[in-house]
Amino acid sequence: MSHPTELNFKTLQFYATAPYPCSYLPDHVARSQVAAPAHLIDTATYSRLVEQGFRRSGLFTYRPYCDACQACISIRVDTQRFRPSRTQHKAWNRHHHLQSRTMPLHWEVEHFDLYRRYQAGRHAGAGMDEDSQAQYTQFLLASRIDSYLVEFRSPAGALQMVSIVDRLESGLSSVYTFFDPDAKGSLGTYGILWQVEHCKQIGLPWLYLGYWIGESRKMAYKSQFRPCQILHQGVWIDRVDPA
């Protein structure tokens, strides 16, 4: 008899979206391949999809499916072999005093206020700085897999950062992180370093960072966490910097 996860995977259907403006490369048009129906995508099924380059936004599971562009590359950090760079080590030391707390996904006004401040400070004009409570909830708090939220607070209790994380069979997937846009010292870098360390503590070999685009300055930071692997023609390979 087939395992339920295997049945779920075989029952999934995949369809391509209509073209839409690319969020990362100006003057580019993007399309996505979507896995459906969403209710069949449990943690085990989603783990397999992530291995094949998929990612989720709320209940929407997709991967790039562009007609004339392959710029989006899935990337993951080898957590067991990872060694921080000097800059990353400084970011870790600067924010290591923050107190982390892991909890189920849930709505909090304080989180939403920080999210709005982050979008306005870091991504003004991109549309997400105008997100409503419903849009925020659909984007970050809707999940049918093993997902959780991590708060980072100062010793005095001030909320500094929130990360949404998925736990997969082979690692963690970093869904989204938002933080105080006025904070100094690379809080975002610290957030990824914390997730790498968390992977090590719970014995997971990979931290999936979504898509890396070599031409996008916004994505450049992802390739700085080394060693890392990229998905090339369906196979995960070590990323090597050009000579």
Image (cartoon, grey):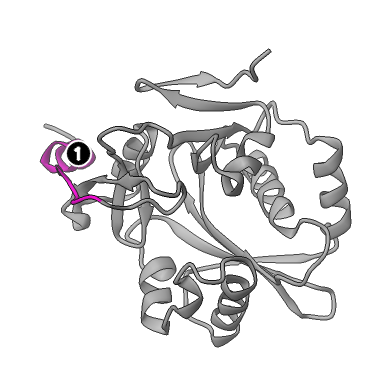
Q: Quadrant of the C terminus?
A: top right
Horizontally, residue 75 falls left or right of residue 11, namely right
Residue most extreme to the front: 27
Residue most extreme to the top: 243
Q: Amino acid at mark 1?
A: Phe
Magenta stretch: includes residue 16 = yes
The residue positioned 30% from the left and 51% from the top of the image is 61
Q: Position of residue 144 (x, y in %)?
A: 32, 60
The residue positioned 80% from the left and 65% from the top of the image is 98
The residue segment tinted magenta is 4-19
Horizontally, residue 6 falls left or right of residue 170, namely left
Q: Quadrant of the N terminus?
A: top left
Q: Position of residue 226 (x, y in %)?
A: 68, 30
Q: Position of residue 197 (x, y in %)?
A: 70, 44
Is residue 169 or residue 76 the one in the foreground?
Answer: 76
Q: Is residue 92 visible?
A: yes
Q: Which residue corresponds to mark 1?
A: 9
SS under mark 1: helix
Q: Is residue 162 visible?
A: no
Residue most extreme to the bottom: 109
- How crowded pointer 1 is (Cα within 10 Å; few <14, some 14-19, many 20+) is rated as some
Is residue 13 or residue 17 the one in the foreground?
Answer: 17
Residue 4 versus residue 143 in the image, above or below: above
Q: Position of residue 84 (x, y in %)?
A: 78, 36
Magenta stretch: includes residue 56 = no
